[in-house]
Image: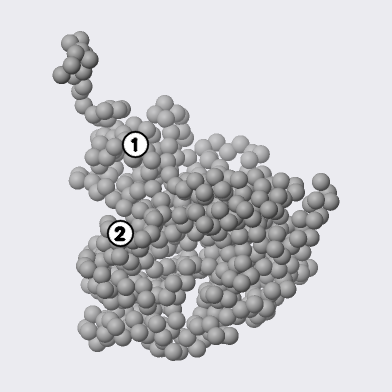
Amino acid sequence: MSASHQASPHKKPRQGLRGRQVEQQTRDSLLALLGTPPFERGLLIEYLHLIQDHYGAIRKSQLVALAALLDMSQAEVWEVASFYAHFDLVEDDQSIAEKPIKVRVCTNPSCAMAGAEDIWSTLNQKSHPGVQLSRSPCMGHCESAPTVQVGHHTLRNASIDSVSHAIQHQDIQPSRPDYLAFQSYRDAGGYRLLQRCQAHEMDAQQIIDELELAGLSGLGGAGFPAARKWQTVRQQPAPRYLVVNADEGEPGTCKDRHYLESDPHRLLEGMLVGAWVIDAARCYLYLRDEYPAIRSILLKEIAALEHSGLVPAGYIELRRGAGAYICGEESALIESIEGKRGFPRQRPPFVAEQGLYDRPTLVNNVETLYRVREILEHGGQWFSDLGRRGQQGLLSFSVSGRVNSPGVKQAPAGITLEELIEEYCGGMMEGHRLVAYLPGGASGGILPARLANVPLGFGTLQEYGCFIGSAAVLVLSDQDDLRALVCNLSHFFREESCGQCSPCRLGTDRLLRLVQERGWNQSLIEELAELMADSSICGLGQAACNPALSIIRYFPELLSAQEENR
């Protein structure tokens, strides 16, 4: 070894790990909280939730100790913890209130239209010791906007008085709604389908054929045929996994929440039938963190299901999201289940071939699996015939905005907005005239009132520059500001971009600045949209410009008025 590479005789050898050292007291406190080693690397996010819930925040020394317990680098643990919005990372010497009350105000379109900005402004004008205020993206209660969460307590049709009352009385625990519990579900015929499968009274291929006849599609937004996905995964080598995507975060979408908090076992039975068809080694149910009441329900009902002997203990793993919209994308969701940042994966390979822990994985949305029992009990043809205008089956439309009766509406695929409003929503609110609507949430674009007679279904809206997505329908009237709506949605996309790919990370920021300008540079917005659609890794970046493009295409008078007023 040359002299330049020889160790200095005055330098002491390194003791312990590189980087910040683990504090014994912090390590001991984490062991008391997390339980007995060994700890699973894939449960990193669950451990972070335990720390956050117990202390109200996560200190850096705790991240250092957690990294040591998991035999991970401190940088990797920090990257994961800082990726998710629901983890509050603080310095060790930073003073924090004893378990501060977190108040999240949803300011996405449905809630903004219902007065959420007034609630936010009023709360910020007052002093609330021990309270942390923050804006929140959609919480999935769009039919009862505005929505505010005080701790884990969700306030529907919130007002400044109801929020202040909840803060004052520390009403922070989730309120569990009435729902169909295990025994009631079973008394009504539940799990007979699963038992028929387990007794081999039904054939796996027969089930796939019925789903294909029904025309059941992935109802999380992509619309991929469910039967084809099941068949693909079933043909892959074991072990295989099944993952339920219960991370609905598309602004305006509340259908999965509706089914999970009213009839959770219908979803669980559909999941277990799918697991039987593909011979899954284990099921994972990934639930968004904005649904604490549903988490309470699922913990209770999964335990009842295990106690009944229908599934072995531990076969169903309930995982908790942490406030990242991007984890609704199936590969990002899988990354999150593995305890990583929710970065979408490059394709191929597809998750059906190489998904969770690099094994073949069936990922289905809540509504898709919720439909399985009724299809198999009544027949695929029965379900298919429920559609209109050549579309198959039913869709669950999450309707919000300027209608008399908002909410989750089970309606025929192929129905028009005009029919949906009149037949299911009690018409427009008094004093409001239909001007526009979002047919598929934030990503699905905006259509004018003159196209309210277009069938709503998979493949029916592409020629208009829109898509049905998760069927989140926001109805807009002559009293709504479409430019403000586009700014709201563009802000959402910028905040929720995972930042992995530069076209989306930089593009969503540039888009927001463009639409906030008094006069829009239409050619630049269109050029940006083309670049983002062609080069973004996932659908967030690919569709982020859709609302702005819709305004350019269908509402040129708004842009002309802007130019005249400059």
Report crowding for label 2: few under 14, some 14 to 19, many 20 or more residues within 10 A (C-alpha): many
Residue at 61%, 36% in the rendered image: 127
Residue 564 seen: yes
Side of 196 where 377 appears, left or right: right
301 above or below 496? below
Side of 112 where 15 appears, left or right: left
Where does residue 466 sit, x and y in percent of width and height? 60, 67
Where does residue 564 sit, x and y in percent of width and height? 84, 51
Query: Which label is found at residue 75?
Result: 1
Residue at 56%, 70% in the rendered image: 468
Q: Which residue is mark 2?
A: 356
Q: In which quarter of the view is residue 183 placed?
A: bottom left
Query: Which label is found at residue 373?
Result: none
Residue at 24%, 49% in the rendered image: 40
Q: In which quarter of the view is residue 309 placed?
A: bottom left
Q: Residue furthest right?
A: 564
Where does residue 116 sit, x and y in percent of width and height? 64, 52
Report crowding for label 1: few under 14, some 14 to 19, many 20 or more residues within 10 A (C-alpha): few
Q: CA distance from mark 2 to mark 1?
A: 23 Å
Q: Which element carries disc 2, helix, strand or loop?
A: helix
Side of 332 where 479 appears, left or right: right
Q: Amino acid at mark 1?
A: Ala
Q: Residue furthest left?
A: 1
In front: 269, or 386? 386
Task: For the residues labelled 2 and 1, say whether their Cβ atoms are less than 8 Å apart.
Answer: no
Q: Amino acid at mark 2?
A: Leu
Where does residue 45 sit, x and y in percent of width and height? 35, 48
Residue 31 seen: no
